Image (cartoon, rainbow, N blue to C red):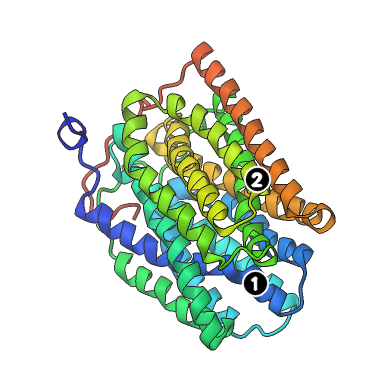
Amino acid sequence: MGVSTALPRVLTPVFLRLLVGNFLYFMTFATFFLLPIYIHQLGGNDQTVGLVMGISGASSLVGVFVVAALIDRVGARLFSRIGFAGMALVALAFSTIDHLGPELFALRVVQGLVFACGFNGNSTLVVMLAPPERRAAALGFFGISTLTTHALAPAIGEQVAALVGFRVLFGVVAAFSALGLALTWSLAGPTPRHIGRRSAPLPVSTTLVTTIAATALCGVSFGSVMTFVPTFTMLAGLGPVATFFLSYTSAAIGSRFFAGSLADRVGHARVILPGMFMLALSIAALATVESTWQLVAVGIWFGLSQGVVFPTLNAWTVGLGALEQIGRIQSIFNGAFNVGITLGALGFGPVVARFGHRPMFVAAGGASLGALGLFATACAAHVRDPAPLHAATDEPPAAGPELGA
């Protein structure tokens, strides 16, 4: 029997509206994957790239603490709105930057803060809208709305920047987030009863803590790829930067159409463990790339692995708590991943500067192997002291005019 008749429906009109808004939000955000190239144009080196790209992740971590403290009390929709509006304004401000200076770093700090609001707000709304037994599938679809921008934004942005320059590009993409804000402003849906009440304590357990640590290490390896593949591709003469992003995102999108539903059926851990192993190998394989076609092949491999691991790991993590804890757990999960991305950018910048890109990719693959070991530990802890992956304390949402109001 197919998923549509055996399990509750995920793609409702409200859910689809949120996905489109999130797609527009990430069209702005993913354009900044090209920022390392602009930094080089302004006279920066790879170490400068690592600092500029990494500082946004550091500020995002600060934002996560604020979001995590408030989101289950004030609602996810408020943070979603802040994210949309802030991302539009920051992108517009980037259109005024024409040199390396404190303004560039300051804008990346602000961008990290508003990203923490928008991404955590939107992803929490997704989890709240999804039936508990369909969370991996729902987060997979949510991932599609972000990953398509990872291909489209750099591909389109690279061409626009070549024609009219990066400053004009940044001004143009600000409109995407503004449109997303307009689309989702009056988002309707159920309002959870716990909004405005005192937050329930988080289930601090070995399973949750170790899972969060594994998520951070996945972020380290992912951050190294996202930060340094653009300059690696350019310096190694492997063709347009968009080549890798197109192959990676196409594979990641394809895998998310089936991986989430498979994980919901057979169990999250059975999908995550082999997925992490393949992710580690794919990142290390970047060290062997010598041609455009090899870059495409490794990009597909990396995309398939990442598309399987991330939404399933997310679903596993939020399933360790009750409904009134979802916002905080989701924010901590996203924050851990962003911390990893920050550490990958900051930590591997000097490695690239001294040893080159290829040894760095091998080390980044090792970080994913470390994540695999940590998640295996989390699985063992869950067997010893199981917590319900679809928490029995989940409270069904009450009818209300707006979700997270």
Mark 1: secondary structure: helix
Q: Quadrant of the C terminus?
A: bottom left
Q: Label 1 to label 2, Cα distance in Å?
A: 21 Å
**Horizontal and vertical percent for residue 308?**
44, 39
**Horizontal and vertical percent for residue 295?**
56, 54
User: In the figure, 104 relative to 53: above or below?
Assistant: below
Neighbor class of circle 1 (other Cα within 10 Å; few <14, some 14-19, many 20+) is many
**First reached walking from the N terminus: tag 1 or tag 2:** 1
For residue 388, side relative to residue 217 (left or right): left
**Horizontal and vertical percent for residue 383?**
50, 14
Would residue 165 be visible to someone looking at this image?
A: yes
What residue do we see at 69% from left, 50% from top? 344
Residue 220, numbered label: 2
**Horizontal and vertical percent for residue 122?**
41, 54
Q: Name the amino acid, label 2.
A: Val
What residue do we see at 21% from left, 34% from top? 3
User: In the figure, 298 relative to 47: above or below?
Assistant: above
User: In the figure, 176 relative to 30: above or below?
Assistant: below
Neighbor class of circle 2 (other Cα within 10 Å; few <14, some 14-19, many 20+) is many
Question: How many marks can you see?
Answer: 2
Which is nearer the eye, 58 or 304? Answer: 304
For residue 198, side relative to residue 210 (left or right): left
For residue 359, side relative to residue 213 (left or right): right
Q: Residue furthest bottom?
A: 164
User: In the figure, 262 relative to 17: above or below?
Assistant: above
Would residue 394 be visible to someone looking at this image?
A: no
Nearer mark to the viewer, of 1 and 2: 1
What residue do we see at 58% from left, 42% from top? 282
Contact (Cβ within 8 Å) of mark 1 with mark 2: no
Q: According to the image, label 1 marks what residue?
A: 37
Q: Name the amino acid, label 1.
A: Ile
Mark 2: secondary structure: helix
